[in-house]
Image (spheres, rainbow, N blue to C red):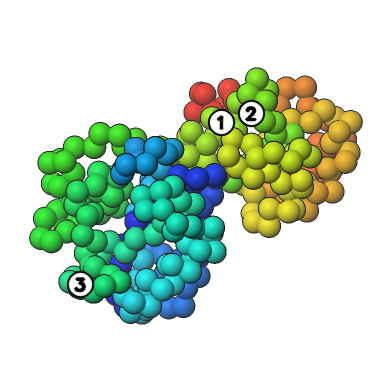
Amino acid sequence: MADVVLGLGSNLGDRSGFLKAGVREIGDLDTTQVRAVSSIYRTDPVGPIDQGDFFNIAVRAETDLSPTELLSATLEIEQANGRSRSERWGPRTLDIDILTYDSLKLTSEELTIPHPRARERAFVLAPLSELDPTLRLEGEPVNALLRELGDPGVDRLIPFRKCQTVGIVGASFNAGRYSNRAQRLLMEKGHSVVPVSARDEDILGVPRYRRLRDFGGSIDTVTLYLSPPQQRDILDDLLEAEPGRVIFNPGTESLETQRTLAENRIPFEAACTLVMLQTGQF
């Protein structure tokens, strides 16, 4: 099997959510196994277009796919996650680059390996250096290339394995609401968010869901921003989602909901999500 390293980036919507989807779908490819993933890095955008910051990771995998087969597969993953290529250097939901493929050197119209601009980009070198500081690009160790280039505009957020998918039940587009502030901080720290609201608006650039079950993926944590009477309408949905835990923010504590969660062996706690994030307890 070939040892490959890929770079993934996103700067639209639920950036960590798109990165998690990309890693999962790469691992689902035929004869392909993901072996390691770097931390998530927040990086300044590159190019002439004014746009939001990127989240970037590096992924090491083994595959029996040829370079062109792997390229075709990654393009399909990008498209499945809403990638638009209408504007060069423009914002994107998910970008996947093949950085290295064993020690192969390849130049064609559709693909160049190693990636021709990897050594010039701190947002590529920083996660690469964490993933494997002995990895070489065109004969030079990536950690040496990073030291030479420096890492302006590159901030390490959280290890990929600690990136949670968080359902925000009672999410709000109102910047003064606690749920909005919690969503903003969750995203800033590198977590994936699933805003749940009856309103139709996107919330902080992330499409909202009417119910947790509409998300379709696994939920690590649900943070509640609904009063106890309102929770009766979402209790079945909450049980169906089977989250890893539920957080009752101040004012949302419901004995009925807590009793039902306990009966279904879903862990819960009464806490403030904002405080947990601010103090490193999340």
Q: In whole angstroms, how far apart are the C-alphas of marks 3 and 2?
A: 47 Å
- Report, in whole angstroms, how far the alpha carbon at label 1 lies from the one at label 2: 6 Å
Quick one: SS at disc 1? helix
Q: Position of residue 111 (x, y in %)?
A: 28, 70
Q: Which residue is depicted at the point 47% across and 73% down?
A: 29
User: Residue, x 80% and y 49% (percent of image)?
Assistant: 237
Q: Amino acid at mark 1?
A: Arg
Instruction: Say which residue appears at 79% left-offset and 39% top-offset.
Output: 198
Of tags 3 and 1, the one toward the viewer is 3
| Residue placed most toward the observer, 130 or 7 | 7
Q: Is residue 31 left or right of residue 119?
A: right
Residue under numbered circle 2:
180
Q: Nearer the viewer, residue 136 or 245?
A: 136
Does 116 appear above or below 209? below
Q: Does residue 110 sit above or below 81 in this rendering? A: below
SS of the residue at dot 3? strand
Relative placement, left or right, of 158 versus 230 is left
Q: Are marks 1 and 2 in contact (CB under 8 Å)?
A: yes
Mark 3 or mark 1: which comes first in sequence? 3
Quarter of the picture holding the C terminus: top right
Q: Is residue 235 visible?
A: yes
Q: Which mark is residue 184?
A: 1
Q: Is residue 45 left or right of residue 16?
A: left
Q: Quadrant of the N terminus?
A: bottom left
Amino acid under disc 3: Thr
Q: Are marks 3 and 1 in contact (CB under 8 Å)?
A: no
Instruction: Give the alpha-carbon distance from disc 3 to disc 1, as whole Å.
Output: 42 Å
Would you say residue 265 is visible in this rendering? no
Residue 208: x %, y % from top left? 68, 43
